[in-house]
Amino acid sequence: MLTERGFISRLRQSAAGAGPALLRGIGDDCAVFAPAADRSLLVTTDTLVEGVHFDCRWHPPELLGRKAASVNLSDIAAMGGEPKYALLSLALPGDTDEGWLELFMGGLLGALGEQKTNLIGGDTVRSDRLTFSVTLIGSAAPDRILYRTGARPGDLVWASGYLGEAAAGLDLCRLADARKENWPELVKAHLDPRPRVALGLFLAASGIVHAMMDLSDGLATDLAHLCVESSCGAVVSADLLPLSPALRAVASHLGRSPVEYALTGGEDYELLFTTAPGVRGSLPGLVRAATGLDIHCLGEIVAGSGVRLLQDGEKREIAYHGYDHFGR
Ligand SMILES: [Mg+2]
C-alpha cells in the first residue's frame, strides 16, 4: 500500500503550490493559512465508504479520486464560493494496492487542481473498509454567499444540466454487463460528476439568485430541503424537466420512468437555484455565454409548503422521495 511517507510527499507537492496565503502546509501539527480580509470562510466535509457510496468493481481508482474531490467542490459551488484548500483522510485495508492508490491520488489531485485547490493536510489509518473523507475550505465575499433560505413565492426554480443521469448510470454499472458501453455519458455522470464551481461563482456575482444548493440526493428531496429552509413550497412541471435523449433511452430499456429518474435520482451535482421571474427569457443565454452550461427553468416557488409535480394536468406531492442515507 501507499506508504505514509508517499502520502506525505503527495501532500507536500500539492501544498507547495498553494501560494503565500498558506503559511504552513505540512510538516507541523496543523496547516496554517491566512484568510483574506473581507472574505468569509466556507467549510464542508463529505465521506465516501466502499459498499455504501462506491463500488470498486466498476469505479476506476482515478475517477473515484476525482469524485471524492468533486462532491466536496460541489458543496462550495452550491454556496457561490471559491474552493481553496482540501484535507484528506484515508482509511485503508491492509491489502490496498499501491498502484491503485497512486491512481486514486492522481485523480483527486487532478480534480482539485482544475479548481485551483490545494491539498494541504491529511491522515491515513488502517480500516477493514476503504473510506475517503475530504474536507474542503473555500471563501466568498460575505454579501455574495447564496444560502438555501432566500427563496420566496413567485420565484422561478432552475437547475443546471440534465437530471437523473448519474442514477441511470449507476443502474447501468450494476447490470455488470456490456450494456453500459452503449451510454457512456450516463456512466460518466455517475463515475465522474463535474462540480459547477464556475457556474456557482457566476450566479453569486450576478446578484439575481435568491437561494441555491447542489443536487446530491435527487430533485424531489433537495428542493424539499430548500423549501423547508425558505418556508415556502414549490411546483415543478414534468414537461420542463431536462431529460437527455440518453436518459430517455436507458429508462425505456430498463422499464423505468425518465421523470422518476430526474425526480429521485441522486448524485447529479448540478446546481438548483431560484430567481425572480423577470429573468426567465434572458438568464439561460447569459449563463451559456459565461460558462458554456445550460440551465433550465423547472417551475416556481409558491406560498405554503411541500413540493408538487404538475404532470398531465394533475398535481401530486413528491417531497422526500429521494435517497435516504439511513436506508428507509
Ligand atoms: Mg450539498
Image (cartoon, helix red, strand yellow):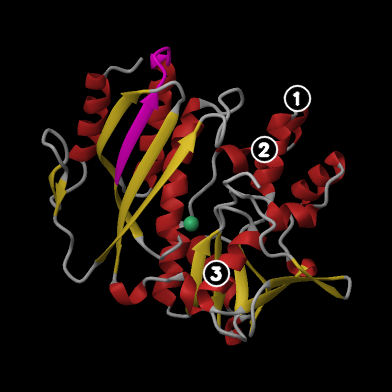
Judging by the rendered image, the residue that carries numbered circle 2 is 170
Q: Which quadrant would residue 11 be assigned to in this image?
A: top left
Residue 107 seen anywhere in this rendered image of the structure: no
Image side of residue 196 versus residue 284, left or right: left
Image side of residue 171 versus residue 111, left or right: right
Q: Amino acid at mark 1?
A: Ala
Residue 226 seen anywhere in this rendered image of the structure: yes
Query: Which mark sits nearer the N-terminus, 1 or 3?
Result: 1
Judging by the rendered image, the residue that carries numbered circle 3 is 226
Image side of residue 268 versus residue 307, left or right: left
Residue at 55% across / 69% down in the picture? Answer: 226
Residue at 71% across / 61% down in the picture? Answer: 242
Q: Amino acid at mark 2?
A: Leu
Judging by the rendered image, the residue that carries numbered circle 1 is 178
Q: Is residue 34 magenta?
A: no
Q: Is residue 87 magenta?
A: yes
Q: Amino acid at mark 3?
A: Leu
State yes or no: discs 3 and 2 in contact (Cβ < 8 Å).
no
**Magenta residue span:** 86-98
